[in-house]
Amino acid sequence: MRPLHISAETAIKLSEKLGVPVEQIMHMPQHILLQKLAELDKDKEN
């Protein structure tokens, strides 16, 4: 599986928000990353 095509700055920001190491963000499948971001957004709304 290829790494995500995101910048290093974006990966760092995502890792801070999700509490996940940067390396894990870069190798996370895109659909799982989108699911985690949706959950984070949903939690933020409540």
Image: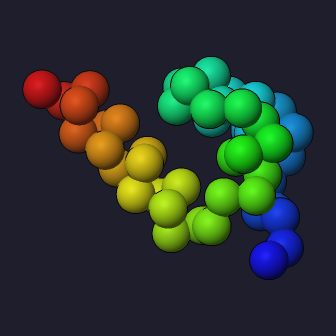
Residue 16 location in percent, x, y?
A: 62, 22
- Residue 42 appears in which quarter of the rendering? top left
Q: Nearer the viewer, residue 3 or 13?
A: 3
Query: In the image, is residue 10 above or below residue 16?
Result: below
Residue at 52% of width from left, 31% of height from top? 18
Residue 40 location in percent, x, y?
A: 35, 36
Query: In the image, is residue 28 above or below residue 37?
Result: below
Query: In the image, is residue 33 above or below residue 22?
Result: below
Figure coloring: rainbow
Task: Count all numbered tags in the image, as a single digit.
Answer: 0
Left or right of 21 on screen, residue 41: left
Quadrant the N terminus occupies: bottom right
- Residue 46 appears in which quarter of the rendering? top left
Residue at 62% of width from left, 32% of height from top? 20
Left or right of 46 on screen, residue 16: right
Left or right of 20 on screen, residue 10: right
Left or right of 27 on screen, residue 44: left
Query: In the image, is residue 31 above or below residue 23?
Result: below
Residue at 42% of width from left, 48% of height from top? 36
Residue 28 location in percent, x, y?
A: 66, 58
Which residue is situated farthest in the bottom direction here? 1
